[in-house]
Amino acid sequence: FVKFSVQVGATIVVILHGVSLSLFVGSNIFTFVLTALWIVGITNSFNLLDNMDGLAAGVGAICAFIFAINSYRQGDPQTFFLSVVMGGSLVAFLRFNFEPAVIFLGDAGSGFIGFFLSGLSVAANYLETSQLEQLPIITPILIFSVPLFDTFSVMTIRLLEGRSIWDADNRHFSHR
């Protein structure tokens, strides 16, 4: 509850500072709620993904570099710079996080990766030079497809087994 409350609080601060989804919907409340669900959801997806050495950091690095490519093509230098720095930091971290790992992410590390990348995905620009109308909406979903798939599959399995979605297990995509 404490961890979730801090995530929601940090997300509200980010939204109040102008980082929010723009889906061309007139409702500020809908935009606020959707942005909060996205940021908190991706943050927790990376926390769930941190179940073996190198996984969350490796997926985070891949996501960051894809955001860098997208932001470079869209002419968004701030998002490009932040993406490259995050991706490079995660690649450097991976040197010490593979078997035998000498340092670990933990909840704080995986939560930071998810929070940072989800905020970056909201702040990024997908529309400037896009030729496809649907691409701007599905781009972040595709980039985060691995953590999202893992989260939804684990939650579904736990619910079908009649267990709480918060119970730990080894039913993650990486374990299977």
Image (cartoon, helix red, strand yellow):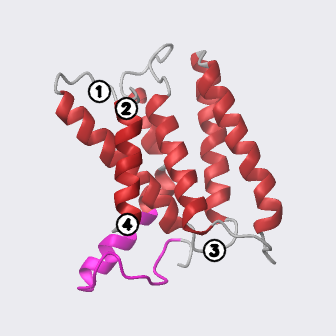
**Marks 4, 2: nearer the viewer:** 4
**Pointers 1 and 4 in contact (CB under 8 A)?**
no
Say few, some or many: other residues with alpha carbon within 10 Å of mark 4 (under 14 / 14 to 19 / 20 or more): few
Give the amino acid type for the residue marked by disc 1 in the picture.
Leu
- Please state the horizontal and vertical placement of residue 99, each as a whole percent of the image: 79, 76
Upstream in sequence: badge 3 or badge 1? 1
**Marks 2, 1: nearer the viewer:** 1
Give the amino acid type for the residue marked by disc 3 in the picture.
Met
Residue on which disc 4 sits: 2
* Quarter in which the N terminus is drawn: bottom left
Upstream in sequence: badge 4 or badge 2? 4
Residue on which disc 2 sits: 137
Give the amino acid type for the residue marked by disc 2 in the picture.
Ile
Residue on which disc 1 sits: 23
Relative to residue 4, is residue 34 drawn left or right? left
Stretch of the chain drawn in magenta: 150-173
- Please state the horizontal and vertical placement of residue 123, each as a whole percent of the image: 47, 29
As rendered, which of 104 and 48 lies closer to the eye? 104
**Pointers 3 and 4 in contact (CB under 8 A)?**
no
The image shows residue 140, relative to residue 56, as above or below, that is: above
Say few, some or many: other residues with alpha carbon within 10 Å of mark 1 (under 14 / 14 to 19 / 20 or more): few
- Which label is found at residue 5? none
Upstream in sequence: badge 3 or badge 2? 3
**How far apart, in angstroms, are the residues tagged by discs 1 and 4?**
31 Å
**Marks 3, 2: nearer the viewer:** 3
Residue on which disc 3 sits: 52
Say few, some or many: other residues with alpha carbon within 10 Å of mark 3 (under 14 / 14 to 19 / 20 or more): some
